[in-house]
């Protein structure tokens, strides 16, 4: 099939979270299955600037016109990349905002992006399916089924829409419809209206042909009031078109045998490199590493957005208890000022036990996965999560809350049988988190039991092969829902 991905970020060009990893890895896996895949992204700062293949698309915003261009980024791993280029909107310091505040013109930025995607699809197609991701691309199906509904070049093209995180809606004042040249008829409860605002994510949920989310458990959770973020009724109404497909990981990038960013390679047959990696990451974070006892001390790693969603209010609640334990913590990430300050404060108060880097650094993230003994993800909710899957492959034992993809991918350790891959707790409480940490430390003290636990995790296969096949089958179903014969471009 000929498939077009539309997303607001994707490695190796842009990243704030796991969406970027998926938009890099899933297209590669689909190409390996024989499909023709293109990815279209905004052209952010430092992204390719040439060649320009469509020099001036006309995008109508009410009475205003804008003229973004399309840059051909060439092929990487068989995937063809294109970029929507409008320097005023996208050549900025960050992707979505600065200092934890969204850019005030995000509706315009991603409204233009969506229109450019549709216009590109007309000119570069025909595509058999457009796969859109999160609220920033949610206007693509809205436009296809409203203002472009009568366009014969697009009538047979279905949209598969993936919800990576139900907590981010793209919610704007009602006036945004007129500002983006969208019809006022969209401002109704059965379309895009949401408690008096225009909700981009809701538009994607309503107008797409099929919906997916990034784990089976999360597909169930978003149909509940607890996790549906106010849109659970919309999702339940479309439950027959919803599928949970677990994200995979790219083991060519995330594997200790092949990782070029870590201090030493290692594998199940030889763990010696992991100790080298642990000493290295301690030194990178400025924690004691000179003595054997320093390296022997259990090390918990964190790579995350610093946000309440990620469970850092629980960490804040039990920080005093954690500091009484014989362990060290290294954290990499940025986000809400409250949690950035929490980690900085702990590092200042306990400089031999806690260290933080308030940034995102891909090389350091790899070093943490390889060098830590345990990886902490106490999320309030977690649609899929990737770091716990990376951790399994690196023999870094996850400690997680049983929600979403964390629940799907981590099997609780059973001390009687030696089965399991990590530790998880159900109640969203500090005491439950501490219980799992103490359990992990207890098993860590038993070297043979800990090694078996590491080996259990490293044997798991969460590559994209199976998940890409599920997506390919869904694309076929989506195409047939709008067309009566098999697509001419199918393989």
Image (cartoon, helix red, strand yellow):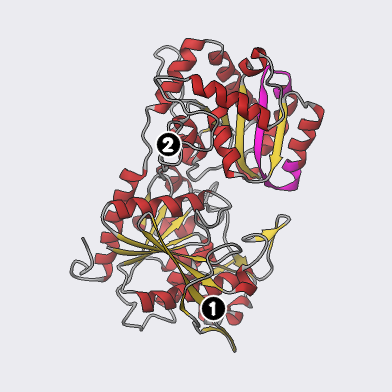
Examine the rendering and report whether any part of residue 471 can be seen.
Answer: no
Q: Residues within 10 Å of mark 2 (few under 14, many from 20)?
A: some
- The residue that label 1 is drawn on is 68
Q: Position of residue 348 (x, y in %)?
A: 81, 31
Membership of 363 in magenta stretch: no
Membership of 326 in magenta stretch: yes
The quadrant where residue 67 appears:
bottom right
Q: The residue tagged with tag 1: helix, strand or loop?
A: loop
Q: Residue at x 41, y 15 (%)?
A: 418
Marker disc for residue 453 = none
Q: Residue at x 32, y 80 (%)?
A: 153
Q: The residue tagged with tag 2: helix, strand or loop?
A: helix
The residues tagged by marks 2 and 1 sit, at their Cα atoms, a distance apart of 42 Å
Q: Position of residue 127 (x, y in %)?
A: 32, 70
**Vertically, is 162 above or below 57?**
above
Q: Position of residue 476 (x, y in %)?
A: 26, 60
Which quadrant, please, contains the C terminus?
Answer: bottom left
- The residue that label 2 is drawn on is 408
**Vertically, is 69 above or below 295?**
below
Which quadrant, please, contains the N terminus?
Answer: bottom left
Is 328 left or right of 140, judged from the image as shown?
A: right
Say if mark 2 contacts mark 1, CB within 8 Å: no
Q: Which residues are magenta?
A: 322-340
Is 144 left or right of 89, judged from the image as shown?
A: left
Q: Residue at x 56, y 53 (%)?
A: 15
Closer-to-camera residue (55/245): 55
Closer-to-camera residue (105/226): 105
């Amino acid at each position: 099939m000929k498939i077009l991905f539309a997303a607001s970020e994707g490695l190796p060009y842009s990243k704030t979270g796991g969406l970027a990893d998926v938009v890099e890895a899933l297209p590669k896996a689909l190409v390996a299955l024989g499909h023709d895949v293109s990815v279209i992204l905004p052209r952010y700062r430092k992204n390719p600037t040439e060649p320009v293949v469509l020099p001036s698309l006309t995008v109508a915003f009410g009475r205003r016109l804008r003229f973004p261009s399309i840059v051909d980024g060439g092929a990487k791993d068989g995937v063809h990349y294109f970029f929507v280029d409008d320097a005023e909107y996208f050549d900025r310091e960050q992707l979505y905002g600065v200092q934890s505040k969204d850019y005030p013109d995000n509706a315009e930025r991603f409204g233009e992006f969506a229109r450019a995607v549709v216009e590109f699809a007309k000119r570069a197609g025909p595509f058999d399916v457009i796969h859109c991701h999160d609220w920033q691309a949610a206007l693509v199906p809205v436009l296809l089924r409203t203002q472009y509904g009568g366009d014969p070049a697009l009538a047979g093209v279905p949209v598969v829409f993936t919800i990576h995180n139900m907590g981010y809606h793209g919610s704007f004042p009602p006036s945004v419809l007129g500002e983006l040249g969208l019809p006022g008829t969209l401002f109704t409860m059965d379309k895009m209206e949401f408690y008096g605002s225009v909700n981009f994510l809701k538009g994607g949920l309503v107008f797409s042909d099929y919906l997916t989310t990034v784990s089976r458990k999360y597909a169930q959770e978003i149909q509940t009031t607890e996790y549906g973020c106010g849109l659970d009724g919309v999702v339940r109404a479309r439950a027959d078109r919803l599928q949970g497909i677990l994200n995979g990981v790219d083991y060519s990038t995330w594997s200790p045998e092949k990782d070029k960013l870590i201090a030493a390679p290692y594998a199940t047959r030889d763990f010696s490199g992991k100790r080298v990696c642990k000493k290295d990451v301690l030194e990178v974070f400025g924690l004691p590493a000179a003595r054997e006892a320093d390296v022997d001390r259990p090390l918990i790693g964190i790579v995350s957005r610093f946000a309440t969603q990620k469970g850092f209010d629980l960490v804040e609640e039990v920080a005093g208890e954690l500091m009484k334990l014989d362990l060290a913590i290294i954290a990499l990430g940025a986000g809400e000022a409250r949690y950035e300050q929490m980690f900085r404060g702990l590092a200042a108060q306990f400089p031999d036990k806690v260290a933080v880097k308030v940034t995102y650094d891909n090389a350091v993230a790899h070093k943490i996965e390889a060098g830590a003994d345990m990886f902490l993800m106490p999320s309030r909710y977690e649609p899929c999560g990737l770091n716990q899957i990376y951790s399994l492959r690196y023999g870094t034992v996850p400690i997680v809350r049983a929600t979403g993809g964390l629940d799907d991918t981590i099997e609780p350790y059973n001390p009687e049988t030696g089965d399991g891959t990590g530790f998880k707790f159900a109640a969203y409480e500090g005491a439950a988190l501490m219980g799992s940490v103490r359990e992990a430390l207890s098993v860590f003290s038993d070297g043979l039991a800990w090694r078996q636990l590491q080996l259990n995790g490293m044997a798991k296969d969460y590559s994209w092969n199976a998940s890409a096949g599920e997506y390919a089958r869904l694309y076929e179903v989506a195409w047939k829902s709008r067309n009566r014969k098999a697509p001419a471009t199918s393989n």
